[in-house]
Image: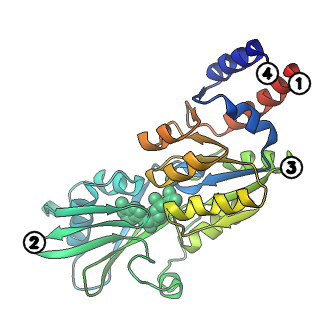
Protein backbone atom coordinates (compact mmCIF):
# COMPACT_ATOMS: atom_id res chain seq x y z
CA UNK A 1 0.00 0.00 0.00
CA UNK A 2 1.20 3.48 -0.72
CA UNK A 3 1.69 5.29 2.58
CA UNK A 4 0.19 8.54 1.31
CA UNK A 5 -3.10 6.93 0.26
CA UNK A 6 -3.36 5.23 3.66
CA UNK A 7 -2.48 8.36 5.61
CA UNK A 8 -5.02 10.41 3.74
CA UNK A 9 -7.66 7.68 4.21
CA UNK A 10 -6.98 7.61 7.95
CA UNK A 11 -7.29 11.39 8.19
CA UNK A 12 -10.49 11.28 6.16
CA UNK A 13 -11.90 8.62 8.48
CA UNK A 14 -11.16 10.72 11.55
CA UNK A 15 -12.97 13.64 9.95
CA UNK A 16 -15.96 11.42 9.25
CA UNK A 17 -16.09 10.27 12.85
CA UNK A 18 -14.08 7.06 13.00
CA UNK A 19 -10.94 6.80 15.06
CA UNK A 20 -8.70 4.16 13.54
CA UNK A 21 -6.56 2.40 16.14
CA UNK A 22 -5.11 -0.26 13.84
CA UNK A 23 -4.41 0.18 10.13
CA UNK A 24 -5.55 -3.22 8.89
CA UNK A 25 -9.21 -2.20 9.36
CA UNK A 26 -9.44 -0.59 5.90
CA UNK A 27 -8.15 -3.72 4.21
CA UNK A 28 -10.54 -5.95 6.15
CA UNK A 29 -13.47 -3.66 5.28
CA UNK A 30 -12.89 -4.35 1.60
CA UNK A 31 -12.66 -8.14 2.04
CA UNK A 32 -15.18 -8.92 4.81
CA UNK A 33 -18.14 -11.15 3.98
CA UNK A 34 -19.87 -10.88 7.36
CA UNK A 35 -20.81 -8.13 9.80
CA UNK A 36 -21.55 -9.24 13.35
CA UNK A 37 -23.38 -6.83 15.62
CA UNK A 38 -24.04 -6.87 19.34
CA UNK A 39 -27.62 -6.01 20.30
CA UNK A 40 -27.87 -3.97 23.52
CA UNK A 41 -26.00 -0.69 23.16
CA UNK A 42 -25.04 -1.33 19.54
CA UNK A 43 -28.21 -1.94 17.49
CA UNK A 44 -30.15 -0.36 20.36
CA UNK A 45 -29.21 2.90 22.08
CA UNK A 46 -28.61 1.22 25.44
CA UNK A 47 -30.39 4.18 27.08
CA UNK A 48 -32.53 1.82 29.07
CA UNK A 49 -35.41 2.83 31.30
CA UNK A 50 -37.36 0.85 33.84
CA UNK A 51 -40.97 0.35 32.75
CA UNK A 52 -42.41 -1.88 35.44
CA UNK A 53 -41.67 -3.86 38.57
CA UNK A 54 -43.83 -6.93 39.04
CA UNK A 55 -43.56 -8.69 42.42
CA UNK A 56 -43.84 -12.49 42.12
CA UNK A 57 -43.89 -13.27 45.87
CA UNK A 58 -44.83 -11.39 49.06
CA UNK A 59 -42.33 -8.51 48.67
CA UNK A 60 -43.92 -5.24 47.58
CA UNK A 61 -42.89 -3.13 44.56
CA UNK A 62 -40.82 -0.70 46.60
CA UNK A 63 -38.75 -3.43 48.22
CA UNK A 64 -38.25 -5.28 44.92
CA UNK A 65 -36.99 -2.05 43.37
CA UNK A 66 -34.78 -1.20 46.34
CA UNK A 67 -33.06 -4.63 46.26
CA UNK A 68 -32.26 -4.26 42.55
CA UNK A 69 -31.03 -0.69 43.07
CA UNK A 70 -28.72 -1.79 45.90
CA UNK A 71 -27.11 -4.48 43.71
CA UNK A 72 -27.04 -2.55 40.43
CA UNK A 73 -25.17 0.30 42.14
CA UNK A 74 -22.12 -1.92 41.53
CA UNK A 75 -22.66 -2.75 37.84
CA UNK A 76 -21.44 -1.04 34.66
CA UNK A 77 -24.10 -2.73 32.51
CA UNK A 78 -26.59 -0.44 30.70
CA UNK A 79 -29.37 -2.28 32.58
CA UNK A 80 -27.84 -1.11 35.85
CA UNK A 81 -28.07 2.53 34.78
CA UNK A 82 -31.83 2.13 34.37
CA UNK A 83 -32.18 1.09 38.02
CA UNK A 84 -29.79 3.74 39.27
CA UNK A 85 -31.61 6.56 37.49
CA UNK A 86 -34.87 5.69 39.28
CA UNK A 87 -35.68 7.67 42.41
CA UNK A 88 -35.17 5.63 45.56
CA UNK A 89 -38.28 3.55 46.00
CA UNK A 90 -40.62 5.03 48.65
CA UNK A 91 -37.78 5.83 50.96
CA UNK A 92 -36.51 2.23 51.07
CA UNK A 93 -32.75 2.50 50.80
CA UNK A 94 -30.86 -0.76 51.16
CA UNK A 95 -27.15 -1.41 51.30
CA UNK A 96 -25.66 -4.51 49.69
CA UNK A 97 -22.38 -6.27 50.46
CA UNK A 98 -20.25 -8.89 48.66
CA UNK A 99 -21.66 -7.71 45.35
CA UNK A 100 -20.30 -9.51 42.29
CA UNK A 101 -21.29 -8.75 38.70
CA UNK A 102 -21.47 -11.95 36.68
CA UNK A 103 -20.66 -10.77 33.15
CA UNK A 104 -23.27 -11.91 30.65
CA UNK A 105 -25.75 -13.03 33.33
CA UNK A 106 -26.46 -10.43 36.01
CA UNK A 107 -25.34 -9.39 39.46
CA UNK A 108 -25.44 -11.01 42.91
CA UNK A 109 -24.91 -9.84 46.48
CA UNK A 110 -26.02 -9.90 50.12
CA UNK A 111 -28.66 -7.64 51.65
CA UNK A 112 -29.60 -7.96 55.32
CA UNK A 113 -28.25 -11.50 55.50
CA UNK A 114 -30.02 -12.77 52.36
CA UNK A 115 -28.30 -13.53 49.09
CA UNK A 116 -30.00 -12.06 46.00
CA UNK A 117 -29.46 -12.25 42.26
CA UNK A 118 -30.78 -9.90 39.56
CA UNK A 119 -30.30 -11.14 36.04
CA UNK A 120 -31.43 -13.09 33.02
CA UNK A 121 -34.17 -15.72 33.03
CA UNK A 122 -31.64 -18.42 32.13
CA UNK A 123 -29.31 -17.50 34.97
CA UNK A 124 -32.20 -17.71 37.42
CA UNK A 125 -33.17 -21.12 36.04
CA UNK A 126 -36.40 -20.15 34.34
CA UNK A 127 -37.26 -22.23 31.33
CA UNK A 128 -37.95 -20.41 28.05
CA UNK A 129 -41.56 -21.46 28.45
CA UNK A 130 -41.92 -20.03 31.98
CA UNK A 131 -40.29 -16.81 30.81
CA UNK A 132 -42.52 -16.57 27.73
CA UNK A 133 -45.66 -17.31 29.77
CA UNK A 134 -45.03 -14.24 31.93
CA UNK A 135 -44.55 -11.90 28.96
CA UNK A 136 -47.08 -9.09 28.64
CA UNK A 137 -48.56 -8.24 25.24
CA UNK A 138 -47.29 -4.66 25.60
CA UNK A 139 -43.65 -5.74 25.29
CA UNK A 140 -42.03 -4.54 22.08
CA UNK A 141 -38.77 -5.40 20.28
CA UNK A 142 -35.96 -3.81 22.23
CA UNK A 143 -37.60 -4.42 25.61
CA UNK A 144 -35.60 -6.38 28.15
CA UNK A 145 -36.81 -8.44 31.06
CA UNK A 146 -34.74 -9.39 34.09
CA UNK A 147 -35.64 -11.18 37.30
CA UNK A 148 -34.90 -11.05 41.01
CA UNK A 149 -34.43 -14.25 43.00
CA UNK A 150 -33.11 -15.27 46.40
CA UNK A 151 -31.63 -18.72 47.00
CA UNK A 152 -35.06 -20.33 47.02
CA UNK A 153 -37.40 -18.66 44.59
CA UNK A 154 -38.24 -15.94 42.13
CA UNK A 155 -39.22 -12.63 43.74
CA UNK A 156 -39.77 -10.13 40.95
CA UNK A 157 -39.82 -9.45 37.25
CA UNK A 158 -38.59 -6.13 35.84
CA UNK A 159 -39.45 -4.86 32.37
CA UNK A 160 -37.05 -2.37 30.83
CA UNK A 161 -37.34 -0.45 27.58
CA UNK A 162 -34.48 0.12 25.20
CA UNK A 163 -34.76 1.94 21.87
CA UNK A 164 -33.67 0.50 18.57
CA UNK A 165 -31.26 2.91 16.85
CA UNK A 166 -32.95 4.83 14.05
CA UNK A 167 -30.27 3.83 11.54
CA UNK A 168 -29.97 0.13 12.52
CA UNK A 169 -32.36 -1.18 9.86
CA UNK A 170 -30.77 0.91 7.10
CA UNK A 171 -27.30 -0.30 8.07
CA UNK A 172 -28.34 -3.93 7.90
CA UNK A 173 -30.08 -3.47 4.54
CA UNK A 174 -27.06 -1.68 3.11
CA UNK A 175 -24.61 -4.38 4.20
CA UNK A 176 -26.90 -7.08 2.85
CA UNK A 177 -27.15 -5.26 -0.48
CA UNK A 178 -23.37 -5.08 -0.57
CA UNK A 179 -23.37 -8.87 -0.32
CA UNK A 180 -22.34 -9.27 3.34
CA UNK A 181 -24.01 -11.69 5.72
CA UNK A 182 -25.44 -10.01 8.83
CA UNK A 183 -25.44 -11.54 12.32
CA UNK A 184 -26.92 -10.29 15.59
CA UNK A 185 -24.85 -11.70 18.45
CA UNK A 186 -26.32 -11.16 21.90
CA UNK A 187 -26.15 -12.25 25.51
CA UNK A 188 -29.91 -11.75 25.69
CA UNK A 189 -31.51 -15.18 25.38
CA UNK A 190 -35.13 -14.05 25.36
CA UNK A 191 -37.81 -13.97 22.68
CA UNK A 192 -37.24 -10.19 22.49
CA UNK A 193 -33.99 -10.91 20.70
CA UNK A 194 -35.89 -12.93 18.07
CA UNK A 195 -38.44 -10.14 17.61
CA UNK A 196 -35.75 -7.55 17.08
CA UNK A 197 -33.75 -9.75 14.70
CA UNK A 198 -36.89 -10.27 12.61
CA UNK A 199 -37.77 -6.57 12.66
CA UNK A 200 -34.29 -5.56 11.53
CA UNK A 201 -34.01 -8.34 8.95
CA UNK A 202 -30.68 -9.83 10.04
CA UNK A 203 -29.66 -13.06 8.29
CA UNK A 204 -28.67 -14.80 11.48
CA UNK A 205 -29.40 -14.48 15.21
CA UNK A 206 -27.06 -15.98 17.81
CA UNK A 207 -28.60 -15.33 21.22
CA UNK A 208 -28.09 -16.15 24.88
CA UNK A 209 -24.32 -16.40 24.52
CA UNK A 210 -21.69 -15.61 27.14
CA UNK A 211 -18.69 -13.40 26.31
CA UNK A 212 -16.64 -16.56 25.65
CA UNK A 213 -19.49 -17.94 23.59
CA UNK A 214 -19.42 -14.81 21.44
CA UNK A 215 -15.75 -15.38 20.70
CA UNK A 216 -16.30 -19.11 20.09
CA UNK A 217 -19.02 -18.25 17.54
CA UNK A 218 -16.63 -15.98 15.68
CA UNK A 219 -13.83 -18.56 15.68
CA UNK A 220 -16.20 -21.17 14.22
CA UNK A 221 -17.13 -18.73 11.47
CA UNK A 222 -13.49 -17.95 10.85
CA UNK A 223 -12.63 -21.64 10.59
CA UNK A 224 -15.30 -21.88 7.89
CA UNK A 225 -13.52 -19.14 5.93
CA UNK A 226 -15.43 -16.02 6.98
CA UNK A 227 -13.83 -12.62 7.29
CA UNK A 228 -15.83 -10.73 9.91
CA UNK A 229 -16.34 -7.20 11.10
CA UNK A 230 -17.56 -7.02 14.70
CA UNK A 231 -19.38 -4.04 16.23
CA UNK A 232 -19.98 -3.90 20.00
CA UNK A 233 -20.02 -1.76 23.10
CA UNK A 234 -20.00 -3.79 26.31
CA UNK A 235 -17.58 -5.45 28.69
CA UNK A 236 -19.14 -8.67 27.42
CA UNK A 237 -18.02 -7.80 23.87
CA UNK A 238 -14.35 -7.29 24.72
CA UNK A 239 -13.14 -10.81 23.85
CA UNK A 240 -14.99 -10.92 20.53
CA UNK A 241 -13.88 -7.38 19.60
CA UNK A 242 -10.29 -8.40 20.25
CA UNK A 243 -10.71 -11.64 18.28
CA UNK A 244 -12.47 -10.33 15.14
CA UNK A 245 -10.65 -9.64 11.87
CA UNK A 246 -11.66 -6.01 12.35
CA UNK A 247 -13.77 -4.49 15.08
CA UNK A 248 -15.52 -1.26 15.96
CA UNK A 249 -16.57 -0.02 19.40
CA UNK A 250 -19.44 2.39 19.91
CA UNK A 251 -18.68 5.89 21.26
CA UNK A 252 -20.90 5.28 24.27
CA UNK A 253 -19.33 1.87 24.92
CA UNK A 254 -17.31 0.81 27.94
CA UNK A 255 -13.59 1.61 28.11
CA UNK A 256 -12.82 -2.09 27.90
CA UNK A 257 -14.72 -2.37 24.60
CA UNK A 258 -12.91 0.65 23.16
CA UNK A 259 -9.54 -0.68 24.22
CA UNK A 260 -10.29 -4.05 22.66
CA UNK A 261 -11.53 -2.72 19.30
CA UNK A 262 -9.54 -1.80 16.17
CA UNK A 263 -11.54 1.37 15.60
CA UNK A 264 -14.00 3.57 17.50
CA UNK A 265 -17.15 5.22 16.13
CA UNK A 266 -16.72 8.71 17.56
CA UNK A 267 -20.45 9.33 17.59
CA UNK A 268 -22.92 6.51 18.15
CA UNK A 269 -23.87 6.65 14.50
CA UNK A 270 -23.97 3.30 12.71
CA UNK A 271 -24.06 4.86 9.23
CA UNK A 272 -20.41 5.77 9.67
CA UNK A 273 -19.62 2.10 9.12
CA UNK A 274 -21.00 2.40 5.60
CA UNK A 275 -18.98 5.54 4.99
CA UNK A 276 -15.88 3.73 6.24
CA UNK A 277 -16.45 0.80 3.91
CA UNK A 278 -17.01 3.11 0.92
CA UNK A 279 -13.80 4.93 1.73
CA UNK A 280 -11.92 1.66 2.14
CA UNK A 281 -13.08 0.52 -1.31
CA UNK A 282 -11.98 3.83 -2.88
CA UNK A 283 -8.62 3.64 -1.14
CA UNK A 284 -8.03 0.13 -2.43
CA UNK A 285 -8.60 1.34 -6.00
CA UNK A 286 -6.05 4.10 -5.56
CA UNK A 287 -3.52 1.72 -4.04
CA UNK A 288 -3.86 -0.93 -6.76
P1 LIG B 1 -25.88 -8.14 25.45
O1 LIG B 1 -25.04 -9.07 24.61
O2 LIG B 1 -27.30 -8.08 24.93
O3 LIG B 1 -25.27 -6.75 25.51
P2 LIG B 1 -24.98 -9.18 28.11
O4 LIG B 1 -24.12 -10.31 27.67
O5 LIG B 1 -24.31 -8.01 28.73
O6 LIG B 1 -26.03 -8.71 26.95
O7 LIG B 1 -26.03 -9.74 29.16
C1 LIG B 1 -26.88 -10.81 28.84
C2 LIG B 1 -28.09 -10.77 29.72
O8 LIG B 1 -27.69 -10.94 31.10
C3 LIG B 1 -28.85 -9.45 29.68
O9 LIG B 1 -29.78 -9.40 28.62
C4 LIG B 1 -29.53 -9.49 31.04
O10 LIG B 1 -30.66 -10.33 30.99
C5 LIG B 1 -28.49 -10.15 31.94
N1 LIG B 1 -27.63 -9.18 32.65
C6 LIG B 1 -26.32 -8.92 32.44
N2 LIG B 1 -25.86 -7.99 33.30
C7 LIG B 1 -26.90 -7.64 34.08
C8 LIG B 1 -27.09 -6.73 35.18
N3 LIG B 1 -26.12 -5.96 35.66
N4 LIG B 1 -28.33 -6.66 35.73
C9 LIG B 1 -29.34 -7.43 35.28
N5 LIG B 1 -29.23 -8.29 34.26
C10 LIG B 1 -28.04 -8.41 33.67
MG1 LIG C 1 -23.93 -4.53 24.32
Front-most of residues 160 and 14 = 14
The answer to whether the residue labelled 2 contacts the one labelled 3, judged by CB atoms less than 8 Å apart, is: no
Residue 59 visible in the snapshot = yes
Sequence-wise first label, 3 or 4: 4
Q: How many marks?
A: 4
Residue 153 left/right relative to 44: left
SS of the residue under disc 1: helix
SS of the residue under disc 4: loop
Measured from the top left, where is residue 7 in percent x and y? 69, 15
Sequence-wise first label, 4 or 1: 4
Number of the front mark, 2 or 1: 1
Residue bearing mark 1: 285
Measured from the top left, where is residue 107 in percent x and y? 31, 65
Number of the front mark, 3 or 1: 1
Between the residue at mark 2 and the residue at mark 4, the CA separation in whole angstroms equals 63 Å
Residue 222's quadrant in the figure?
bottom right
Number of the front mark, 4 or 1: 4
Residue that protrudes farthest toward the left in the picture? 112
Q: Residue at x 70, y 58 (%)?
A: 183
Residue bearing mark 2: 112
* Rendering colour mode: rainbow
Amino acid sequence: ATPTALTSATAHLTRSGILLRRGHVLDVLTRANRIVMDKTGTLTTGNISLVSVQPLAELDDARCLAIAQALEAYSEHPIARAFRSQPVADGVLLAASDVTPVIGYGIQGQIEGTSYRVGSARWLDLSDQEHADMASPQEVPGDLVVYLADDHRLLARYTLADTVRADAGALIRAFRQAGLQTTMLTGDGSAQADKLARELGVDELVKGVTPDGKLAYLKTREAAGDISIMVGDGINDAPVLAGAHASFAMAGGTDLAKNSADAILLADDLSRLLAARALALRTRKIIK
